Amino acid sequence: MPPKTPLAKRPVGTAWDPKRDPAHGRRLRAIPALTNGTERRVHVGAQTLIAGLRRSLTHLEALRALDRSRNLAEARHWLDDLPLRVHAIPAEVERTLDTVPEDYKDKRDPELHPGLQDLAYQITWDIHEACAAISDPDLYLAGVDEGIEPVTDEHIRLAIWGMQRELLRELRGPAGPAGTRRPAVQLSELPNHIQRALVERRRLRYQQWGIGQAEWEANRWSVWRIPEDPDWAPPWVPAD
Amino acid sequence: MPAPTTTPVRTPVEPKPEERPWQEQFTDPWEICPQQVREVGSPDIAP
């Protein structure tokens, strides 16, 4: 069960589960993964950001301080220049793909920075919704007509392949001996209009977290480019 | 004396595979763990 106190009022360093917490605020929700704290100090990344506090800072207070305080310019800059891709093998971080590889055998793929956990959940939630087309071939999944660059058929094929990689490895199913796990959904077997809508949404989702083509090419993202969107709530958490 | 009652026995009908919700046939991507979800984001591929 998520805590009843809103994220904005909870002290930095308290438990945070973005999959189940209904907290509002697109930018604010990125803060728990990027900060830690005790009663007397707040850390941003590996740095001690604020020490000698009389009481714990809430997430909203920390965000406001990071945004405005002259004394926190270094931490503000750190949050402005974070890596987009993270990889267990550092040399792999800069590798990107522009076509579907013919012989892909990697056991570990690059992942989004932990501060972008909500973006990851949003993309996966869109996939979850698209998969309803397996049971309901008449499913309508809205794509994105405006506000993004159109996606090409080639990009749809690549993005669908990219999302499929991890789904093929991560199987779940009833508890029991190996072999009872359910197979992965096959995204390439969804109707073409569903695949297109899914990839258009993926492009939109990146944009909604402040990441466009330039940020992707530079492999950087910024907390300050995530819109504040104080009323935004994750669609994957049921409303009370 | 009341007549004895019997509970009708119903044989469960196994739904055809095409009638089952997809979550019963496949792994729901929503079930995978937070780190793997970040890999599904596939940031090595352009938005």
Image: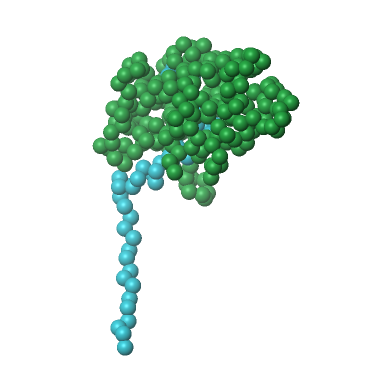
Chain colours: A green, B cyan
Judged from this view, the residue extending furthest toward the left is A138
Is residue A163 something one can see in this rendering?
yes
Q: Position of residue B29 (x, y in %)?
A: 44, 36
Which quadrant does the C terminus of chain A fall into?
Answer: top left
What residue is drawn where x is 60% and y is 14%?
A: A77
Judged from this view, the residue extending furthest toward the front is A54
Q: Position of residue A96 (x, y in %)?
A: 49, 16
Q: Position of residue A139 (x, y in %)?
A: 28, 36
Q: Position of residue A43 (x, y in %)?
A: 67, 25
Residue nearer the viewer, A158 or A43: A43
Is residue A171 something one can see in this rendering?
no
Residue nearer the viewer, A191 or A70: A70
Looking at the image, residue A9 sits to the left or right of residue A190; the answer is right
Judged from this view, the residue extending furthest toward the bottom is B1
Q: Is residue A17 above or below residue A159?
A: below
Q: Is residue A22 above or below residue A215?
A: below
What residue is drawn where x is 47% and y is 21%?
A: A227
Q: Is residue A153 above or below residue A37?
A: above
